[in-house]
Amino acid sequence: MSRLIIISNRVSAPKESHSGAQGGLAVALQAAIREFGGIWFGWSGETVDHFTGHIHFQRAQGVTTATLDLEEQDIEEYYNGYANRTLWPLFHYRIDLAEYERGFAGGYKRVNERFADTLRPLVEKDDVLWVQDYHMFPLGQELRDRGCKNRIGFFLHIPWPPSRLLATLPEAEALVETMFAYDLVGFHTKEWLDSFRHYATHELGAEEEGDALTFKGRTLRLIVAPIGIDTKEFVEGANGPKARLALRNMRDSAVGRDMIVGVDRLDYSKGLEERFHGYERFLSEHPEERKEVFMLQIAPPSRGAVESYQKIRTKLEGLSGQINGAYADVDWVPIRYVNRGYPRDVLAGIYRAARIGLVTPLRDGMNLVAKEYVAAQDPEDPGVLILSRFAGAAAQLKEAVLVNPFSADEVSDAIMQALRMDLGERKRRWRAMMDNIEQEDVVWWRKLFTDALMGTDGSTPIPADN
Ligand code: GDG
């Protein structure tokens, strides 16, 4: 059997098992490494003065991780720079925020070369490699340039932008060309896959045949593989003691009011500003509802070294203050805005306490919060998910109340619709969404991809050195 080598920017080693400490993706990838043997390879999170290529090996609970330290300049140019100031905004359709700097592009290439240089000697003949996400687009090509003939797959966790937007990136053509180093490329939705295919065929001139694309003699296969959550673990967590305690505390503090919850990394792609405006529209249009509801927005800060993240943070602080200033009363505050993270099982209890899950990204590869909110609900009295049409999750969770997150009116109407929804309809919609979340969980996703990559899904196997 082939070993599986997973490569991503950051690596998650298994932690001592106390429930809900780790996200579903980390657990699923660790399980894959346990099943196939192999390594999880990536950046250690540490910086050093001079890059040495020294690899830190660790083994915990049957999972080997191999990590590298990078230089401060690497992190500035590759991580804070090209990954999070160039690619992230562009791939979330925000070319107004995307910064195109040669220095970033250079640092990004250098780090991918460093990854390839250090990883190459670890790769054995029959290993299968799986590269994760936008930090590592050119890694496959760098490995091929170093003689690596193994099967290599790539999965993109964020959207793929329309060709006309991607074309604004100076390195667009070169970047897409390097994708042909992979044997298999996966996306969360058909929409993202189609955008990639459009660029490859229309701008690059790749040939299309079924789910395969060929360019300059190399063929890659495309696959839609929507990621799920660790549903069983999450439902168990939601029924566990910590979640129950959190649920009780939330209910006590809600004093009979309906809670609307949002949980997001503090990121402009998550549509928090627009969400606040939508909620404000609801408050202004329905004065009779004001003290009947409140919104809890949990938003742990992320990528604080990047200016656009500092700006969105300041903006949201101002906006939540403004809304609270305009509407609050001595015994009621409309928005509880919290800039910190909570343990997963506490989150589960909070989700369950909420009558409405408000998930309104402007653009999102998938969005796991939407799935977690549904999974945490009480089957006998489930809450309502309001979900952006522009999240990848909308392709699966069709029974959510789907909204255009840019429209304050639609968000406001959806809140009203959710508050009025009777138990029968809430249960029917919840059951339909839960069926999907149970079937297409994170293990299903992982198998879908690795089976396709290893050729064990009944599709024509990809020749190892095509
Ligand atoms: C990228 C793509 C895609 C949030 N606050 C806390 C906390 N979280 C957890 C959530 C959820 C995760 O973080 C966020 O996942 P998302 O999917 O919503 O978003 P991204 O971080 O942007 O992830 C996305 C994903 O990759 C997977 O492919 O779905 O589209 O952008 O699990 O629960 N967790 C804890 N405390 C918090 O306060 N413990």
Image: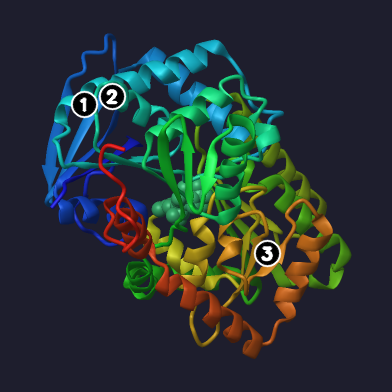
Q: Are marks 2 and 1 in contact (CB under 8 Å)?
A: yes
Q: Amino acid at mark 2?
A: Ala
* Spatial separation of the CA atoms under disc 2 and disc 1: 6 Å
* Spatial separation of the CA atoms under disc 2 and disc 3: 50 Å
Q: Position of residue 354 (x, y in %)?
A: 57, 70
Q: Position of residue 111 (x, y in %)?
A: 36, 20
Q: Amino acid at mark 3?
A: Phe
Task: Assign a secondary structure to mark 3.
Answer: strand
Residue 406 or residue 198, whichever sits in front: 198
Residue 148 or residue 315, whichever sits in front: 148
Residue 54 or residue 33, whichever sits in front: 33
The numbered dot on residue 120 is 1
Residue 63 appears left or right of 135: left
- The answer to whether residue 241 is above or below residue 60 is below
Viewer-side label of 3, 1: 1
Task: Assign a secondary structure to mark 2.
Answer: helix
- Mark found first going from the N terminus, 2 or 3: 2
Q: Which residue is mark 2?
A: 116
Its colouring scheme is rainbow
Residue 423 appears left or right of 39: right
- Mark found first going from the N terminus, 3 or 1: 1
Q: Position of residue 336 (x, y in %)?
A: 62, 55
| Residue at left offset 55%, top offset 11% | 102
Residue neighbourhood size for the residue with mark 2, other residues' Cα within 10 Å, grouped as few (<14), some (14–19), many (≥20): many
| Residue at left offset 33%, top offset 19% | 113
Q: Amino acid at mark 1?
A: Arg
Task: Assign a secondary structure to mark 1.
Answer: helix
- Report whether residue 376 is seen: no
Q: Which residue is mark 3?
A: 294
Residue neighbourhood size for the residue with mark 3, other residues' Cα within 10 Å, grouped as few (<14), some (14–19), many (≥20): many
